[in-house]
Amino acid sequence: MSNIAVRPVSFSRQDEGDEPTSIPRVEGRVLVVDDAEAKRYFIAKTLRRVGMEVVEAATGQEALAAMASRPDAVVLDVRLPDMSGFDVCHQLKQDPATAAIPVLYVSALLRDEELESRLFEDGADGYIPQPIEPKHLVAQTWALVRMRRAELARQREREQAQVEQQRLQHELAKSQARAKRLTESGVVGTLYWDLDGAILDANDTFLAMVGYTREELAQGRLDWRKMTPPEWEEPDRQSVEVVTRRGVSLLREKQYVRKDGSRVDVILGSALLEGESRRGVSLVVDITARREAERKLTQLMAELESKERLLQAVLQQMPTGVLIAEAPSGRMLLSNERLASILGACAKENVAEFRLRFSEHLDGTPYRMEELPLVRALRQGEEVREVVVARRDDGSSRLTRTCAAPVRDAEGHIVASVLTMEDITEQAVTQDSLRLSEERLRLALDSAALGVWRYDPVSQALEWDTRSRELFGLPSEAAVDRRLWLEAVHPEDRERVLARLEGVMAGESRGVLESEYRVVGFGEGGVLRWVSSRGQVHVDAGGRRWLMGTVRDITEQKLAEQHAVALQATTAAFAHALTPQQVADALVKHGLKSLDACAGSVCCVDGEQLLVLGAVGYAEEVVRANRGMPLTSHSPLSEAARTRRAVWIESREAFERGWPEYAHWTQVGQSRSWGAIPLVSGARVMGVLWLSFSTVRRFSEREKAHLESLCRLGAQALERARLYEETRRRAELEQQFLGMVSHDLRNPLQAISLGARTLQLMERPSPEALMRTTGRIANSADTMGRMISDLLDFTRGRLGGGIPLTRTENDLVRLCREVIDEFSVTHPSSDIRLEGDGSCEGWWDEARMRQVLSNLLSNALRHARAGTPVVVKASRKPGNGVELVVSNEGEPVPAELLPVLFEPFRRGMSKFRPSGSLGLGLYIVRQVVEGHGGKVVVETDAAGTSFIIQVPPGAEPAPAG
């Protein structure tokens, strides 16, 4: 009832007639169901005025749907359009979710006694007679709402009480479960006792501890006083006093005598039961296993002390110094007297300090803490071996071989480190003497660059020293014999050298061997060397002959001789070569000869391709298949051209691994090694020299340097030949150009001459004839002027310094508009369109920029497709530059003309040259644009052609003086 708020509210007489003006104000949600809109409005308004929330429905189905809003009461008309109010009420009372909601019938057609009879049949809670009085409506509705609210409150209280009861039951069950788990855990024994000694009850864990059964417990045969050993009776008595006085005793240790007479060690805690003075409970934990572990630990400690004494005795007998340090602190655990002797310490305590001043590097610098072998072994977990100088207290020093190793436990953790120190001072002195003698002998041999060898012809055993092995490309520990030596000798020299050896062993040349030959080393990547071998046949007492001698590397001497001859011949050949083809032939020929290559070719750079210019030693079909190669391809030749560095490939495996796309080249001929050397002249790569070798070899630095020098000479010769060809072609073009200029100047000159004679012959020419003749003379003179102006600009550009420019402040859009206006007068039928950004200002030569635009417009109009416009675009670009684009629709510029479109002469020779033009227009355009610091490009396709000019805005020229 407390959930319903009641406060007075007044109705005006205008709304309710003569009804009382004071009606209680209530809160609640009421569903009003009536198909008469006026009556439903009256009921809803009356209930809302007293504070109720009203939900309205006009039909039975709407009323049933509105029950989702959970109203506190329903005011229901018994007659509805789709179903009767009695049916609605019946359905509500049948549904458990809405059965408790009170229903109030309203009807103007039924009598009161009829409504009252239906109340009991349908389970309704009341009715309102007609006519409806507001106070009766409010009173009955309020009563039903309060009844519904009270019922809901009681229901909530019952639900809360049930939840709380369930929670308490759950907590009780948890507590009981914990107590049961503790009792049945098998770890803690529980017993209930009285002070007379009887054990009233116990769990299975305690019974297992003392060895009794539950039957014996039930028979009363368990007495805790009798189960207590005599030495524990006094502590028991004191514990009983504490329990009777305080109700509880602290945990303590105790022993019980088991049924079999053995004892069990326990920890015991006791307390009196609630409301009892002589009965209590005890919790017991078996600690027998812990006691047994403690006894074993004591035994192990005794054994450890015995072994430590044995270890100390062994350490003192060792010939090396030993130190054992703890990890990670580094604290010393053990050391022996030998360590003290090495360090020169007077007492063991000095050894324990192990100060840093005891240790020095071989160069005399003292060890830092982190450098000590013992510290490094502890920190890095690895064995450390070093030779350490031990500085003694008396100032002397000893050379020691020191080893520090970590000691790990079963889990792999470092627990200690062992340091051993061996005095090698005398041994080092002896080794130094022996090493000094060996170094003197080696110095003598090295100064002469000699290797020593010995050969037994019977067993064919061959002995080489380290230097001899190095000359033949063998590691110092490799075994050698006659077969391996012959394998290293160059195939072309092998027969000659073998014949010379057999002749000397047969007695020729008084047993003296002198031979020079080439070796290529063992295995893959052998370096070609020249060696000089000298030996003497010796005979022992038994008549057994053997040969001993020396070998020396004479590669530098031989290569210097060969390279000098090769360079002299190559220089002479290059001097007589005038064309690139002749240079390529000479370069291939002398490149093959200088390094004993089996085949080679020269490729020249032509645009973005490498083209074969000359080849020797390759089949014609191979050369034809690889005639051209893109510079962007992943091949040795392209890489050498792009990087400007030589590419040396010393085996087929290296070729296939580095350039798999061209691995098929390794199958051409008998090639096994290759080299690609770029032909560089200044900043330009002219081409690549490609050499193939029939043997696997590693190229020496001297060979590489010689071939690179040869290629530099070849590049210079190619550059000279290219310049010669260019000069020759230019001379031919200039002769053609002079003839063309003479022809083109003769036409307007003849027109002027003819016009002048015509005027001379006219006695009284008419104005029309006079204007026509003078116009022809003026047009011809203008044509000659333009041609001469182009010639002057061309001459200025070719003589150096470029076309002179006079910069002033200009607007490119305005300039374009003026030039287009001029062309509109001379070309009235043409469609020229201007697209600009409004203002493109900068500092340019106005006259020259007009000339640029005029030349481009003339070309665009001349080659535009009939009826199509020419578009001029002027715009400013990021970076404060400007762009001028002249576009037309017409035939594209031929592809063969694009590379030379802006060159003089060549364009003049094309079919694009119009009558009266020297073909220098685009050349002058490029000169003017580049003079302004810009660039000009052309884009052409089937849709048309665009000339694009980009120039910077420039700057105001500095004042003169």
Image (cartoon, helix red, strand yellow):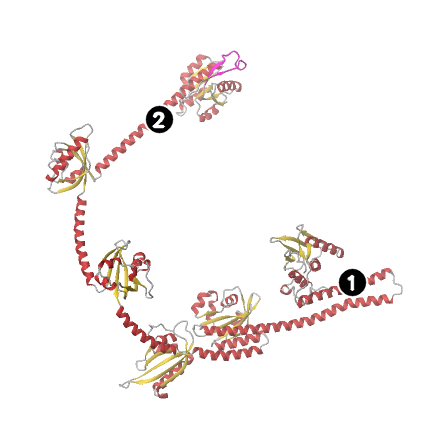
Q: Tell me: residue 759, above or below residue 537.
A: above
Mark 2 / mark 1, whichever is N-terminal: 2
In magenta, the rendered stretch is 8-25
Q: Nearer the viewer, residue 812 or 312?
A: 312
Q: Is residue 327 magenta?
A: no
The C terminus, quarter of image = bottom right
Q: Quadrant of residue 519?
A: bottom left
| Residue 359 percent location from the top left of the image | 30, 62
Q: Which residue is mark 2?
A: 159
Q: Is residue 562 left or right of residue 740?
A: left
SS class, disc 2: helix
Q: How dense is the environment of label 1, judged by Cα within 10 Å: few (below 14), some, or many (20 and up)?
A: some
Q: Dot 1: what SS?
A: helix
From the top left corner, tell me how far across and down residue 574 is, in percent: 56, 77
Image location (x, y in percent) of residue 252: 18, 38
For residue 651, side relative to residue 324 (left or right): right
Does any portion of residue 669 appear in the rendered image? Answer: no
Q: Give neighbour class at mark 2: few <14, some 14-19, many 20+ (Cα, 10 Å).
A: few
Query: Which marked residue is nearer to the observer: mark 2 or mark 1?
Result: 1
Amino acid type, label 2: Glu
- Compared to residue 550, the image places residue 306 above or below, namely above
Q: Farthest right residue?
A: 764
Residue 383 sits in quarter: bottom left
Residue 437: image quadrant is bottom left
Percent x, y for residue 420?
Answer: 25, 62
Residue nearest the observer in this picture, 184 or 618: 184
Report the amino acid beneath label 1. Answer: Asn
Residue on which the image places disc 1:
779
Judge left or right: residue 205 versus residue 903: left
